[in-house]
Image (spheres, grey):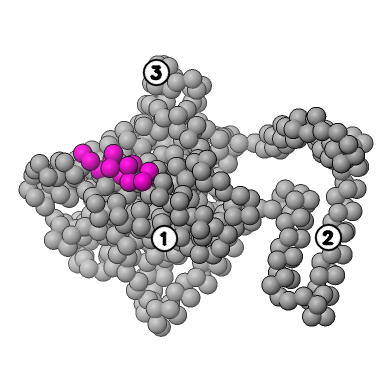
Amino acid sequence: MTFFESLVALLLLAVVLLQVARRTWIPYPTMLATAGVIVALVPGSPAIALEGHTALALFIAPVLLDAAFDFPLAAIRRLWRPLVALAVVAVLLTTAVVAWIGWAFAGLPIAAAITLGAIVAPPDAAAATTVLRSASLPRRAVQVLTGESLLNDATALLLFSAAVAIQGHGGIDGGVALQLGFAVPGGIALGLAMAWLFQFIIPYTRGSFGGNLLEFVNTFVAWLLAERLGLSAVLCVVTMAMFIANSPRMGIDARNRIQSFAVWGVAVFVLNVVAFLLMGMQARAIIGGMDPARLREAAGVAAMVVAGVVVTRLVWVLVYNRLAARFALLRGDAEPTGLAQGVVVGWCGMRGLVTLATAFALPSDFPQRDLITLSAFAVVLATLVVQGLTLTPLIRLLGLGSGDDSQEHQAAERALTGAALAAVVGAEGRVADEVRRQFEIDRAALDGGEACGDFNERRRLKLKAISAQRERLRQLRDDDAIGEEAFERLQEELDWRELAIGPAGQRAIEEG
């Protein structure tokens, strides 16, 4: 099979598996990674290599930007303490534990052992966001885990760069120290500069597919430029996304927001699907190069690394939660986190493409590169499969479901309707009375009663009218009274009207 034929076959397999994942409690990253391993071990199956630096730019940069764009700055200010505890302290502790295992049981040099620890320390942004969508957790836990996934890669990749540089130079010199010290502030500064420049360019391409393409190109350029300059590419992309999302100069209107969100949603989903499949398919390349004796030795070390990664995170989260419950300085104004939520947050540490890609990015002459790569692959597969499969049952067992969101949704709708009525309170005349009447029906319908009848009747009549408009529009096109461009534009307008009238549940498209 050619590369293209192999890719089409893999995507077809992914579609089938995604439908299975939709109808079960198994997160699709777990299913796809496992399927990739099975495909890789089948004789005659295609071998698709994964190049570390390219994989990070192609698969991680868009996922980080997409997640950071939607992450509220207020959450970072409110949750900075647990975010530091997970994105910095947990990464450092995991790195230290794994480095000790690599030094004590595999005979790795200290710098190489730290490299191994940095590779396996950070939970993956793509794995975390996709698995969290399929789980039901309290909002604060989801925000902490999502925020952690945006920031922990920066800590781990800085440690990785430092350890590789020290191993290569035989020690740390002034140039390496200066580069590492400038990586964090430089990455943030570059992200701000890229976002500032982007807001002047995007108005010329907005409302076009070229504008959507520019959004992706800007993301890749920011990541690659940061890497070339030796800065934190993760912090560069995250900073850029948050600046763009919160800049009043951007002024993204509804039409462009709908189009951009749709494009990014599909693109990031496809990248995740391909990434998880490719991760599993690296099994043959990792295992095939080892003789049986070396494989047994490396597998023993890899098993210890997996245990160290999982246990360290779980223990640290539980310890931090107990300390935060005792000392208000560690939790701020938030309520102390219960034991059940701490267990789930500690267990939700799936590794993914960042871990595997950084392992593949090691120089070919790096000490015991085969062992490090196998350990990274073992951590990714074990956490995706074991933790991914058990996370939802664990949440149910501990009774941590977020519950029914309908009351929260209705409360928000009441607040929005109240704001709309307040905005037109001083207007006079027949049109103003009609507008107020529309909003009053909407508000009263939320509380039930007779107004629900008016609300439902209004919806029924509007949908009936739109259905008649659709039929007439098709007839105009078939009679050659309008061209295809006008037909598509008017059809889109009718689609938006129907979405605005219909129930909110009709507007969401599920992953898979």
Residue located at (10% from left, 41% from top): 174
Q: Could you say where residue 179 lies in the image, as x and y percent from the top left?
A: 18, 44
User: What's under tag 2, amino acid-wise?
Assistant: Ile
Quarter of the image containing the C terminus? bottom right
Q: Which residues are magenta?
A: 181-193
Residue 375 shows in the view: no
Q: Is residue 184 found inside the magenta-colored segment of the image?
A: yes
Residue located at (46% from left, 49% from top): 199
Give the vertical position of 327 relative to 116 (above or below).
above
Secondary structure, magenta segment, majority class: helix
Label located before the other in sequence (2 or 1): 1
Disc 1, SS: helix
C-alpha gap between disc 2 and disc 3: 57 Å
Residue toward you, 122 or 421: 421
- Residue furthest to the bottom in view is 1
In the picture of the structure, the residue carrying the numbered disc 3 is 329
In the picture of the structure, the residue carrying the numbered disc 2 is 466
Give the left or right position of residue 394, taking residue 55 as reference. right
C-alpha gap between disc 1 and disc 3: 42 Å
In the picture of the structure, the residue carrying the numbered disc 1 is 217
Q: Could you say where residue 76 lies in the image, as x and y percent from the top left?
A: 45, 33
How packed is label 1: few (under 14 Cα within 10 Å), some, or many (20 or more)? few
Residue located at (65% from left, 36% from top): 403
C-alpha gap between disc 2 and disc 1: 39 Å
User: What's under tag 1, amino acid-wise?
Assistant: Val
Give the left or right position of residue 133, taking residue 380 as reference. right
Residue toward you, 317 or 386: 317
Residue located at (35% from left, 57% from top): 221
Disc 2, SS: helix
Residue toward you, 322 or 206: 206
Q: Nearer the viewer, mark 2 or mark 3?
A: 2
